[in-house]
Amino acid sequence: MDKADPFLGYVSDLVDFVNLKPEDVEEFSRRNFLPKAVWGTRPASHTIVLSPNAPPKQIPGYQLWQTHQKKVQDLWKEGFPFERCLELVVQIDRFSQQAQAWEQVLQMSGEELQKRIDERTLFPPKPETWPIQKAIWFLSVNRWRVQFCKICSQPFAIIAPHTRKQGCCSIPCRNEADTRRKHRWGKKNNWGRN
């Protein structure tokens, strides 16, 4: 059995996360791929004033999961450089610890909270490792697995080493690539007529 097998499952989930659409969030959030606090929060929208004569413009806030998704998409475009992977893994860890700490604080009575603050035992909470962190580390070491579909440009990962030259993310895209290849051959070779 390949040592990478559990990590390949995380990589598959990471591909799903990178391509996640808002309508699929509820189902995906059940995978326990990221801290649960990522899924339920939404920063408020911001109002900006572009000029004194212009009316204020309302800019909607992003959901927190979309912020993490954008960071992973950027990693994908950059080819998973080690330092950027490290930064994101640490950010996810800090977010997880802060979310745990606030969850603990909200469940404490005022007396217990003050006692823990005085004793300096409130932080840090127990560290956790999330599948997203494992997938990012795995891809930072196995960069050859990081690909973009040559048909739809969607990010995907090579799971099996024997499919290293795979250029498409799915069967429909592979069928489209085959059709295009056959069409190019036909044009070049006068459709087999001499």
Image: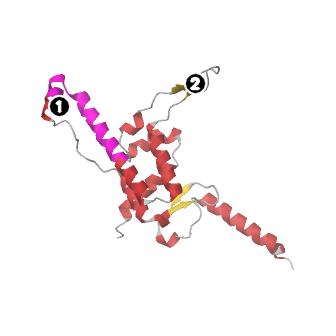
| First to last magenta residue range | 91-114
Q: Is residue 9 magenta?
A: no
Asked if residue 144 is positioned above or below residue 154 in the image, the reply reads below
Asked if residue 65 is positioned above or below residue 86 in the image, the reply reads above
- With 120 as the anchor, is 142 left or right in this view? right
Which residue lies at the image location 36% right of the left edge and 60% below the top edge? 6
Dividing the picture into quadrants, the one containing residue 171 is: bottom right
* Main SS category, magenta section: helix
Q: What label does residue 21 carry, if any?
A: none
Residue 99 in view of the camera: yes
Looking at the picture, which amino acid does disc 2 mark? Val
Dividing the picture into quadrants, the one containing residue 1 is: bottom left
Residue 63 image offset from top left, x and y in percent? 47, 35
Distance between the Cα atoms at labels 2 and 1?
Answer: 41 Å
Residue 135 in view of the camera: no
Residue 175 image offset from top left, x and y in percent? 65, 62
Asked if residue 171 is positioned above or below residue 163 in the image, the reply reads above
- With 116 as the anchor, is 24 left or right in this view? right
Looking at the picture, which amino acid does disc 1 mark? Ile
Residue 43 versus residue 3: which sits nearer the camera? 43
Which residue lies at the image location 76% right of the left edge and 72% below the top edge? 185
Residue 149 image offset from top left, x and y in percent? 59, 59
Q: Earlier in the sequence, mark 2 or mark 1?
A: 2
Residue 41 image offset from top left, x and y in percent? 41, 33
Query: Residue lying farthest bottom?
Result: 194
Q: What label does residue 49 carry, if any?
A: 2
Q: Is residue 97 magenta?
A: yes
Q: Residues within 10 Å of mark 2 (few under 14, many from 20)?
A: few
Residue 189 versus residue 70: which sits nearer the camera? 70
Dividing the picture into quadrants, the one containing residue 110 is: top left
Residue wearing tag 1: 117
